[in-house]
């Protein structure tokens, strides 16, 4: 699926604002009956000339999603077993019961009896349950630079996600900065530096070892603004949700960033293999960091895809990206239909 976003034009001057306004005022003097357009209406065409539509490269997760039915026959006689399968895949008890009841109802109405027919019914039910209107990244508001704050505990694939996202953006000719605000681990800066180099992004390092993470975040946004960058991705430490001081530091990072620019996205990176434990992490981060979207990693080696359903239904937070491998291109935007068919196929 192609996604259309907006970024700044390069090497082009924005049309002057004075002349159109002057022309409107002159026309008003000559013909008093003509209403003066609102300032926003006059400036809108001029402002729009400063942005250009960009179609970024496509990414698909279809090949990386593992089926729920790789070893189990799916037919009308064992539909009750479907509930156990969904529970094991982390859909949760209530959701699993509701999904099975809906599949039975639709299968009966449609006269679906074969394995393929039943899988088609299940895929449709899952897709409808997982679909959200707010699943796209916020890259269309036109308030540049877009600032992404990436949060999550250690080991979930946070740094890898930053590298993949930065690479995808630079492929679309975006000017990307990465702020290395994880200053608690000595190797963290070097790790994100490696990914930044691979992705063709500009890295903002701490000026000294152990520098305050919030100050690094502030300097990263400041440098991006001066360089006329399109987007800033801020790496953060792998904070444990039960550490009040570390979560407080995350809140501080958010506050200092907002002194210079709006935060477009707060992306929480979760490991798909953690299953229901990921919900506890999501709840804690949502309270402090105001999470706007989830990145679900390590989806290539597990059938625990039901966590997507649990996160969206219980927390109201959309899953926006999924990681399906270790390669720099192994990530995709979450697509409910593609995801549902991958689980069922």
Image (cartoon, rainbow, N blue to C red):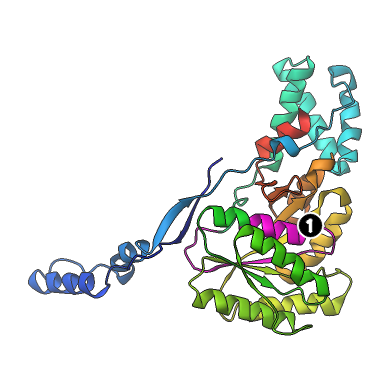
The correct choice, above or below, for 177 with respect to 226 in the image is above
Please tell me which residue lies in front, 14 or 108: 14
Q: Nearer the viewer, residue 248 or 128?
A: 248
Pinpoint residue 89: horizontal percent, then vertical percent: 86, 40
Q: Quadrant of residue 188?
A: bottom right
Could you tell me if residue 185 is visible in this image? no
Q: Which residue is mark 1?
A: 157
Residue beneath the point at 80% across and 35% down: 66
Categorize mark 1 by other alpha carbons within 10 Å: few (<14), some (14-19), many (20+).
some
Location of residue 40 in the rendering, given as x and y in whole percent from the top left corner: 34, 68
Q: Quadrant of the image for the C terminus?
A: top right
**In what element is the residue under mark 1?**
loop
Work out whether 210 lies above or below 320: below
Residue visible at 75% across and 69% down? 190
Q: Which residue of the protein is positioned furthest toward the left in this rendering?
A: 30
In the image, is 125 to the left or to the right of 57? right
* Residue 159 drawn in magenta: yes
- The answer to whether residue 253 shows anywhere in this view is yes
269 sits to left or right of 231: right
The residue at 75%/19% (across/down) is 116
- Range shown magenta: 139-166
Residue 111: x percent and y percent?
Answer: 73, 14
Residue 322 is situated, as x and y percent measured from the top left of the image, at: 71, 48
> Is 32 inside the magenta-drawn segment?
no
Check the image and report above or below for 137 versus 254. above
């Amino acid at each position: 699926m192609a996604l259309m976003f907006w970024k700044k034009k390069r090497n082009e001057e924005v049309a002057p604002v004075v002349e159109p306004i002057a022309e409107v005022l002159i026309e008003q003097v000559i013909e008093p009956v003509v209403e003066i357009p609102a300032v926003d209406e006059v400036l809108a065409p001029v402002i729009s000339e400063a942005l250009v539509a960009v179609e970024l490269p496509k990414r698909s997760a279809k090949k990386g999603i593992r089926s729920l039915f790789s070893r189990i026959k799916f037919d009308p006689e064992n539909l009750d077993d479907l509930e156990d399968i969904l529970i094991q895949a982390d859909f949760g008890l209530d959701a699993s019961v509701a999904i099975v009841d809906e599949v039975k109802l639709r299968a009966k109405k449609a006269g679906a009896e074969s394995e393929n027919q039943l899988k088609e019914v299940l895929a449709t039910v899952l897709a409808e349950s997982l679909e959200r209107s707010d699943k796209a990244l916020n890259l269309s508001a036109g308030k540049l630079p877009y600032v992404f704050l990436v949060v999550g505990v250690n080991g979930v694939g946070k740094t890898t996600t930053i590298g993949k996202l930065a690479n995808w953006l630079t492929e679309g000719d975006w000017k990307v900065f990465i702020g290395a605000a994880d200053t608690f681990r000595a190797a963290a800066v070097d790790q994100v530096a490696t990914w930044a180099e691979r992705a063709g992004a500009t890295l903002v390092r701490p000026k000294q070892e152990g520098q305050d993470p919030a100050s690094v975040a502030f300097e990263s946004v400041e440098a991006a603004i001066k360089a006329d960058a399109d987007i800033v991705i801020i790496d953060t430490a792998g904070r444990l949700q039960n550490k009040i001081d570390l979560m407080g530091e995350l809140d501080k990072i958010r506050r200092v960033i907002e002194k210079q620019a709006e935060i477009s996205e707060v992306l929480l990176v979760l490991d798909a293999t953690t299953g229901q434990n990921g919900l506890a992490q999501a709840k804690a981060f949502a309270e402090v960091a105001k999470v706007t979207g989830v990145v679900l990693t390590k989806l290539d080696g597990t059938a625990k895809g039901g966590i997507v359903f649990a996160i969206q239904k219980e927390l109201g937070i959309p899953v926006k990206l999924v990681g399906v491998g270790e390669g720099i291109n192994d990530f995709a935007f979450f697509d409910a239909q593609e995801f549902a068919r991958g689980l069922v196929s």
